[in-house]
Image: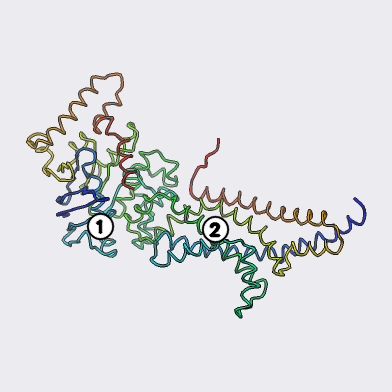
Amino acid sequence: MNQRLADILLESFPRIFTQGLLMTIPLTVLSFALALVIAMLCAMIQIANVKGLRQAVRFYIWLIRGTPLLVQLYLVYFGLPDLGIVLPAFPCAVLVFALNEGAYCAETMRAAIESVPKGQLEAGYCVGMSYFQTMRRIILPQAFRTAFPPLSNSLISMIKDTSLAANITVAEMFMTAQRVAGRTYEHLALYAEVAVIYLIFCTVITRLQAFGEKRLARMNGGDVIRA
Amino acid sequence: MLELTGLHKSIGGNEILHGVNLNIRKGEVLAVLGPSGSGKTTLLRCLNFLEKADSGSVTLLGSTLDMHTASRREIADYRKHTAFVFQNFNLFANKTALHNVTEGLIVARKMPKAEAEAIGMKALKRVGLANKADSYPSQLSGGQQQRVAIARAIAAEPDVIMLDEPTSALDPELIGEVLNVIRQLAEDGMTMIIVTHEITFARSVATDILFMDGGRALVQTDTKNFFEKNDNKRVREFLSSLNERMFLNENDESNKKNISHAHRGGPSHGKRSGMRKKRRRK
């Protein structure tokens, strides 16, 4: 490795990394938090079978899952201004990522809730609890444990998907790397570098996931299948 | 104290219950007997509104509910006076034994936590599981889980406890501990309705027997009468088929467990067929 390349990498690493901390992570955390709220609502509407709303939720999930994330980003950022709706890049990205991930997480949560045996709800009724009390205190905690690994999956994939926000001028990690690469013509090195940084972030999340799973298992007194 | 009249229930176009009546007075133990598929479990589930009846009415402590049109609030009030013990326990998987018992007291009855836990410990002591208070259901044997479920049922001091085949999901060697707990409750004067295949148990603990066949309550009479003087043809057939099986199994000295199977209605009517029935209902 020549001196110039080493200097470029050393100089760009903290820049890209900082941009990750300042942009990619807030973008991910904000979007994912919103996505979870959306997912929770959608899952509950479907489980409780709320008339009318249920169809609306199914339509939303169908629409989101049937169209590419990049197209959704373009549609909202470049398309909606034609209707007079202009959103700044960052809120626009949060909105699209949240709506997109929310649809997928809604299905994860619905499946997790449905995996809790019906007897748990009946037992709740029989000790005098209402539907919502049983949901909140008995069903959802169990469902959350089931949903946790796939939700972690979604979070990890969202961190990486935020690189798409570069397309709508959000200056996150990938765009920062692109700029350096464009200026120095060191494409291989710079894109490899940003890949490593994504890897670092995702490794942290993976560790957190393992920790979270252990905690949830303890809280449920549950044993896990291990050969 | 509890009176059920004209309970009709269809599932998927099949009428399961054709107008069932029953009544039970305070302190009585009513055992519901009958062949598999006769509607015993459906009867009990309707009685606690886990299944919505097509018609029928139930009177508990003087207030009458229409079982088809009862509102959520009416059902909730009714359930404050009843408790239910499930065939497969249905303990809250995310709660310890103690919290399984206290959950309903704290959440539904708004009892202060300390008071609920004192009651919970007392209930666990009553079923002999005070030392397992902090165990989760997955750490307990089937028999222990069912005893916790019984503790959960008695904690709120219900007026009547309904038990749906409380021992039929248990290994033979665990049945005794659960039956002993139920027997103790009966001796303490708890009013209970028990759907069971444990004929000998029913005979020794129940004050009354309700015999179901083909979705009808054919006979409700006191226990002595039922076993000794009954002249109903179906009842005699049912009892003699049990006797035959018991006799066959008693001759088979090689395996004592078979005897307890016979008490539960024979190997072919044991745990497995019960499980299959459950699945079909879903």
Q: Nearer the viewer, residue A179 or A23?
A: A179
Q: CA distance from mark 1 to mark 2?
A: 43 Å
Q: What is the residue that sits farthest to the bottom in this orientation?
A: A84
**Taking B264 as reference, is A41 left or right?**
right
Q: Residue at x 25, y 57 (%)?
A: B81
Quarter-of-image position of residue B176: top left
Which of label 1 and label 2 is nearer to you?
2
How dense is the environment of label 1, judged by Cα within 10 Å: few (below 14), some, or many (20 and up)? Answer: some
Q: Nearer the viewer, residue B256 or A100?
A: A100
What secondary structure is found at the residue carrying circle 1?
loop
Pinpoint residue A152: horizontal percent, then vertical percent. 59, 54
B79 lies above or below B229: below
- Amino acid type of the residue that numbered disc 1 sits on in the rendered structure: His
Q: Residue at x 21, y 26 (%)?
A: B246
What residue did someone put label 2 on? A104
Same chain, marks 1 and 2? no
Please state the chain letter of the residue tagged with numbered disc 1 in the rendered image.
B
Q: Residue at x 25, y 33 (%)?
A: B264
Residue B24 seen from this side: no
**Taking B40 as reference, is B128 left or right?**
right
Task: State which quarter of the image contains the N terminus of chain B.
Answer: bottom left
B162 lies above or below A50: above
Please state the chain letter of the residue tagged with numbered disc 2 in the rendered image.
A
- Amino acid type of the residue that numbered disc 2 sits on in the rendered structure: Tyr
What residue did someone put label 1 on? B81
Pinpoint residue B243: horizontal percent, then vertical percent. 17, 28
Colour treatment of the image: rainbow
B267 lies above or below B141: above
Pinpoint residue A220: horizontal percent, then vertical percent. 48, 49
